[in-house]
Amino acid sequence: MLRFLTSGESHGPGLTAILEGMPAGLPLSADDLALDLARRQTSYGAGGRMKIEQDRARLLGGVMAGQTTGAPIALFIENKDYAKWREREIEPMTTPRPGHADLTGAVKYGYRDLRLALERASARETAARVAVGAVCKALLAQFGVQVGSYVTAIGGVQADPARLAELSYAQRFELAEGNDLRCPDLPAVELMRQRVWDTMQAKDTVGGLFEVIGLGLPPGLGSHVHWDRRLSGRLLGAVGSIHAIKGVEIGPAFENAARWGTQVHDEIFLAGEGNSGELGGAQPDGRLVRRTNRAGGLEGGITTGEPLVLRVAMKPISTTLNPLRSVDLATGQADATTYERSDFNAVPRAGVVAEAMVAFVLADALLEKLGGDSLAELRPRFDALRQARLEDLPMDGTPWRF
């Protein structure tokens, strides 16, 4: 239902994105995109580029009179740094940097200058993704769905799981936005800050972990009937496509791998049942509920109605002030890499990009489920969605044969 393309280079005139499939009637303005674009630029340990750019998306098509029209939405973000590169003689780049797309890009496309790979492979492209994701968040908000993120580790310094467990997801989001490392465990923030400071003094880079959470999702999004319609695979692929992301898990997947099956799966109860499964307290109302969410909100590639939980691992940024050994492709001689301006720590910023990609996948799954070309058509269909309730799941108990 939804698809988007981005175009543009890191130091070119700007970034363009086209988002197709957004229904008509969604209230939308550039201000709705501004907050996430600003959040993407904020991080302790961010490079100098973030002091130059003041990202703001222009809506060039698909929005009229403050509402989407159903036509493709065109977005443009200016690169202010382009002024320093315009009509300038660019020195050829012939020594590939380990960890980048320099060498692999040249192998694939036959580039005679490695900068041609650098310019498009740069994480600058993620500004366009965040703008697209903000549009998708605006659609999801119309149905009470929220996507947020927070950092849980930087450079091996981890937030305390026990302290996080005491906080609701909404509280985690709020606390994370109060500091430039976007971590809700405030005692851990200063330890993380020291680790980033030490990294900067060492002229190195640092990676980390963050979580992306989807709240308010109805059950039944996605499908088990085809491999490419499983929401689990779509989410893993979308988040894994982000620069420097090397691992994504749904819920505590790697921890679950070491447990017994009976310790992993989320048992199903009627609302109102006691811990033993016997009826207790409030009378059951037919709702089927889980008391755990080890599945991370997905079973069989379909949403369960529980919070969607993605845990993401980001490697240290590949561009380091300390040179790395390489080979000059022009001479065939051993060489050292040349520094290109970059971040020391981009983990907090990556979380915002991941929110955008998750919002896009969820908005696509929601539109796939609901159908319709306008917000007015979508609303009653959303209200009529089948829920995890006995009354919505009539079982006739009749035997049958293939």
Image (tube, rainbow, N blue to C red):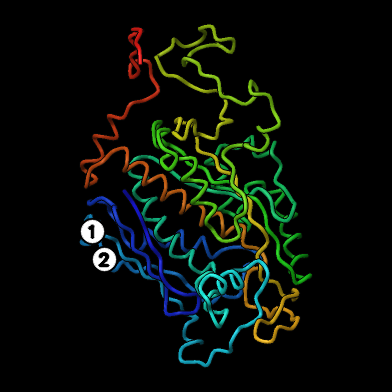
Residue 365, quarter of picture: top left
Quick check: 356 above or below 253?
below
Q: Locate residue 157 relative to residue 248 in the image: left or right.
A: right
Could you say whether the residue bearing mark 2 is in a helix, strand or loop? strand
Q: Quick one: label 2, few (<14), some, or many (20+) residues within 10 Å?
A: some
For disc 1, the marked residue is: 71
Q: In this view of the protein, which residue sits in the foreground, 402 or 249?
A: 402
Q: Which is more N-terminal, label 2 or label 1?
A: 2
Q: Which amino acid type is shown beneath numbered disc 1?
A: Ala
Q: Locate residue 114 relative to residue 15 in the image: left or right.
A: right
Measuring from the top left, give residue 72's x and y in whole percent: 27, 60
Q: Quick one: label 1, few (<14), some, or many (20+) residues within 10 Å?
A: some
Residue pictured at 21% horizontal, 41% vertical:
377
Could you say whether the residue bearing mark 1 is in a helix, strand or loop? loop
Quick check: 1 above or below 132?
above
Quick check: 165 above or below 43?
above
Q: Which amino acid type is shown beneath numbered disc 2?
A: Gly
Residue pictured at 27% horizontal, 54% vertical:
27
For disc 2, the marked residue is: 61
